[in-house]
Amino acid sequence: MSKLVAASRPPAELLLRSAHVIDPNAGIDGAHDVLVRDGEIAEIGAPSSLQAPAGAQVVEAEGKHLFPAFVDPHVHLRTPGQEHKEDLETGTRAAAAGGYCAVVAMPNTDPVLDHPALLRGLLMEAQRDARVPVGFMAAISMGLAGERLSEMSELRDVGAVGFTDDGKPVADAGLLRHAFRYQRLCGGVLALHEEDRALSGAGVMHEGAVSVELGLAGIPSISESTMIARDALIAGHEQARVHFQHLSAASSVDALAAARARGTRASGEATPHHLLLTDEELRALDSNFKMNPPLRTQADRAALVQALREGTIECIATDHAPHSLDEKNVPFEQAPMGTTGLECSFAVLYTELVLPGVIGLEVLLERLTAGARLLDLDVPTIAVGRSANVCLIDLEAHWTIGEAGYESRSSNCCFAGREVRGRNLLTLADGAVAYRERAFALSAA
Amino acid sequence: MRNLVSIDDLDRPAIERIVALATKFGQVADRPIKKLPSLRGRLVINLFYEASTRTRSSFELAAKRLSADVLNLVSSGSSVEKGESLRDTVATLSAYGPDAIVIRSPHAGAPALLAGWTHAAVVNAGDGKHQHPTQALLDCYTLTQRIGPLDGTNIWIVGDVLHSRVARSCIQAFRMLGAQVTVAGPPTLVPDEFTQLGATVAHSIERLREADVVYALRMQLERMEDSLVPSLREYTRNFQINARRLGARQLLMHPGPVNRGIEVSGEVIDSPQSLITDQVAAGVVVRMAVLYEVLAGEPPEARQPDGQAPALEPQTA
């Protein structure tokens, strides 16, 4: 069974007074007092109707919004082996700052998370260091080499959330088919990074007019979509459950929609950067815009946004991928792929998609929490009796991304310098205060 | 002009200014004493991360003709081979107080990064498959010396356009000077996206006779290994510029080094229509003009005679 683990913290005793509560899953949209006792949502009442019990802190939240905290099914916490980029503590601090109450880490660490003993050790480290509950995906293939299956069933018994070779495709269709069949024994979603390396080759950005202009080797959109089409057919044939990671292309959306129309249990995620940015950003050759899959065209971006709105793409994942300054501060072709995203995902999506009216706020909130449902985890819900997993956000606040640095150990954020609206003030994760903005005081009752 | 990283740093007047300056330097080149004192006491570092014969030697000669001190660093045998990052190498070199760094790199964008790290003027001597602005400038100079203004001139660039930094810079520079550019070659090497750069795309050379100037690009063996062309023999059959295809009034250019008998046949290389040796000769005077432009600022006639303006007269000593 999936295990999500965090360091133990005292359960919150809090009265959130007169916040505008919106939770699409619970069907709430209005001003309420929310009382958290012993880490659980104890009472939801009319504004200024609830009394804070002795010892509880009071948060004057009038004019602020209380949302179910977010769940990210796809982050890189770089532990073990690359702690100079991120570790469980800094990565989950970044998550808490961004309003997340749970994150799921990818196994492309050093060594690769492909062995039950390694997972046991990581879960112990998380119990010591993680500020919000963190779950771990294990590798589909040993060493991400694409040759032999990992011990999927034992890994599940130890607590792996699911399986992925993220960062690499499972090129061997036969191996992938075995993994799908084995899933029937042990459960756990197979999350796939889709890329045909014969098509992407040495590419460093989207293949199109901009790559031709810059003289950079391109990664065509078909390198992703042809693999989604193939693997959706294999999953359908095996009646397996498959999740497609970080969709970047319009043709990938089409392939996913076709699979779902056939009745295949396929889901998909999109990242804030693919939803908001295009390859036009690369003209200055800033390596913070280098990621895999690459930023693509305006038409691809529009197709992703539409799929997110309509639900073909069911959830948002940041693919938070920290890299140190020295690693990124090199010529574009030499830089590693990836951008951080946990600390600004809500703000950029709210500013660029909700404020202009492209998608509704409720849709955004649903997509930021739906990763939990797709991975068979508890969906954060603002309801009496549930563990407190909430974030309190000032939608009026203006800020500039990166203006005060980052909680993450790395600063390779493709949204750095953007002026945004919507700032997280407080995150409760599994009933405990995981993040509180420095300037935001909690007063005693 | 502070740096020359890309043709984007220039406009038509800037190109014309550099061409005019190169023309003046060309006149000096005919004198018995070829050296000018213009950049005396200035330090120019040539930082070459890729093998290069003509670009590196012409930059070195250009700097010496202007009396600058020159330091040549090539990647083999230097600290670069020992794993030093570009940033650390540049920090080390900057400690010598260079006035200009000329960089050749296999990676697109390296010169622009460097410009952000050093006070020295940065000149791009070729970065990956991205830009090679001084090559385009010397091609503009060579052509205008031969045929005058390029307005309305029809220039065909033939061959491996996709992997050519020369082609990218030339398309931009030729168009800035009013020429029409067609790029031609197999679809694997000439994708339709080149229309976005303002060039016409052709996948055959049937209409090559429309060209006033035919600019052939080097065809590399590794393109065949990557299956971008099935064989050099077949490429030659479809796209080689030879005496049968090149009309009597058409000019031939090539950035070198030439694969004789592959992209161009021997007889046209050696014909009077060929500007290939003129291009090599232009390399020195145009790079003198570029170094002068980034280090001395305005053209000499525009500067005040306050003793600070570098002299343009030959040294008497």
Image (cartoon, rainbow, N blue to C red):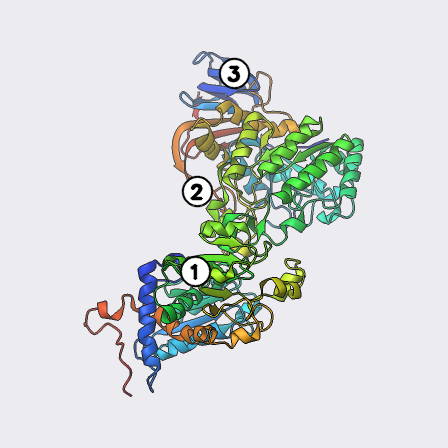
Q: Nearer the viewer, residue A408 or B151?
A: B151
Left or right: residue B299 compared with residue A75: left
* Label placed on residue A402: 2
Q: Residues within 10 Å of mark 1 (few under 14, many from 20)?
A: some
Chain containing the residue with disc 1: B
Circles 2 and 3, Cβ within 8 Å, touching? The answer is no
Q: Kindly identify which residue carries mark 1.
A: B154
Q: Are marks 1 and 2 on the same chain?
A: no
Three-letter code, disc 3: Ile
Q: Quadrant of the N terminus of chain A?
A: top right
**Could you tell which of marks 2 and 3 lies nearer the N-terminus?**
3
The residue depicted at 63 percent of the width and 64 percent of the height is: B237
Q: Is residue A71 above or below residue A386?
A: below
Check disc 3: other Cα within 10 Å, few if <14, some if 14-19, many if 20+. Answer: some
Q: Which residue is mark 3?
A: A28
Type of the residue with mark 2: Gly
Q: Marks 1 and 3: which is nearer the front?
A: 1
Nearest to the eye among marks 1 and 2: give it: 1
Q: Secondary structure at mark 3?
A: strand
- Visible in this render: residue A6? no
Q: What x and y, as percent, mark residue B12?
A: 33, 59
- Label for residue A49? none
Q: Chain letter of disc 2?
A: A
Cα distance in 3D space between marks 2 and 3: 32 Å
Which residue type does callout 1 highlight? Asn
